[in-house]
Amino acid sequence: MKPIILTGICLLLTVYTLRGQLPKGDRILGWHIDMAENNKYDSAFMYAAFACMESVHFTFTWSEIEPRINNYNPEFIEYLDIINIYYPQFGIKTELQISPINTNRLEVPEELTDINFDNPEMIARFKKLLDTVFSHIGNVEIVALDIGNESDVYLGTNSEQYRQLGTFLDSVTPHAQHLYKQLHDEELKVGTTFTFEGLTDPAKGPLCKQVNQNRDIVAVTYYPLDHGFIMKPPEVVIPDIERLIDWYPDDSKPVYFVEIGYSTSKLCNSNEEKQARFYQYVFKAWDTFYDHIKYLTIFKLTDWSQETVEAMGQYYGLNNPAFLEYLRTLGVRTWAGNGTNKLAYYQIVHELESRSWCSFSSADENLAIRPKICTPVVFPNPAKGVAMLFFGNNNENRYILKLFDNNGKRIRTIHQENPRFIIIERKGLEKGTYFYQLTTNHKIVNTGKLQFM
């Protein structure tokens, strides 16, 4: 264990360290982002961005996009258009999940509910759905498309339904890959998501493996749960993941953890310390099975509200108090107000920095997390369209940010009161390196370089 004092926020944090960390390499870290009670997405985004987010996890059901055939939800279409603008300007990719099956529910347009998945009409309708989706996200780089979410829960051990799902996926996957190739001239990885329990279960595992045979990736959700939504000890992570790799030993088909998380609820026999240790073991397992695991989404950034989880309980038909608390407390930040970081957030940042995962500006290796909280940092850097100078905590001062070109000429001045971050737009600027100076109370508090690509 390595004690770290976070100066500036009066917090003494114990960060757990395991030896033998590997550099990032070709691994990709994703985040599932939710807003705190303050309803500020940009603020939530930056907490994930400064924890080395390269990809953001999005999940939609088919019926949410298209409740009835040819009747597309206009709010969803608008949301796709926002995604198409927002994330590319930060250089953030997406992991996109579209689910005709969502855990224990069939989620297809109303007219298709009685049709098998290998029916030509079902296949043709999903291809048309993909046409619509891709026509609105042409700028978005996709690290993986997952068709279906935790489908083993719905399918049980019905071998015929697994066969039908496999036929469906075999038919729609080339169409998705063709659409993406036209947009980006790159190959698209396509998979379908099963639970860890389903992939490693003696009865379900062979059925899931048959479906995964023609997939590009093994997509999995992992929450170490015991009966009654009790969290297992964090130490189960490494043997659990080893068991999964035993099922999929061929590292040419990479494992993508599209969701991985751990509750902090006392009702689930957990707390913040256990959640922090869970992520310690997650990164250790990722190092151990580096050749097999190439993608991981932390699920999730911020806790859900009580109102949200009650609605989810109704959706899943499960209102067990432990289940609701399990869902509510999966975040590594709290929901109330502006949200606060749990111990796991700091642990994750420590794990990332110890592996030089992304650009940190720490001058003191013994204060591994401090710069993320106390020192303003620009992200992304280099930036494409927009960069943000992120503070990470509340500030009660008026700040002035001055931007200079290579010749020392001031080209922009930004004033902001009590900021959590300051937005720096590239608009009107050429590609190249710029210099910034941050002042408050007539004192320079931060300087640095910013590169626009």
Image: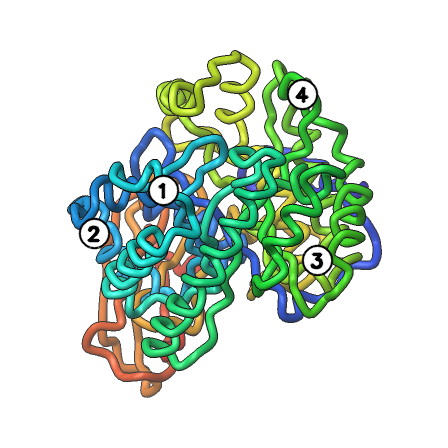
Q: Residue at x 59, y 53 (%)?
A: 211
Q: Is residue 69 visible?
A: yes
Image quarter in which the N terminus is found: top right
Distance between the alpha carbons at the discs numbered 2 and 4: 38 Å
Q: Nearer the viewer, mark 3 or mark 1?
A: 1
- The residue under label 1 is 115
Q: Nearer the viewer, mark 4 or mark 3?
A: 4
Front residue of this view, candidates 99 and 363: 99
Give the mark nearer the N terminus: 2 vs 4.
2
Q: Which mark is residue 230?
A: 4
Front residue of this view, candidates 206 and 417: 206
Task: Residue lying at the far bottom in this picture: please name it.
Answer: 407
Residue 204 occupies quadrant:
top right
Residue 87 horizontal side relative to residue 282, left or right: left
Q: Amino acid at mark 1?
A: Ile
- The residue under label 2 is 77
Give the mark nearer the N terminus: 4 vs 3.
4
Q: Secondary structure at mark 1?
A: loop
Distance between the alpha carbons at the discs numbered 3 and 1: 51 Å
Q: Nearer the viewer, mark 1 or mark 2?
A: 1
Q: Position of residue 394 (x, y in %)?
A: 39, 39
Q: Position of residue 313 (x, y in %)?
A: 43, 20
Q: Are marks 2 and 4 in contact (CB under 8 Å)?
A: no
Distance between the alpha carbons at the discs numbered 4 and 1: 37 Å
- The residue under label 3 is 354
Q: Amino acid at mark 4?
A: Ile
Distance between the alpha carbons at the discs numbered 4 and 3: 31 Å
Q: Are marks 4 and 3 in contact (CB under 8 Å)?
A: no
Q: Secondary structure at mark 2?
A: helix
Distance between the alpha carbons at the discs numbered 1 and 2: 26 Å
Crowding at dot 3, Cα within 10 Å, few <14 / some 14-19 / many 20+, comes out as some
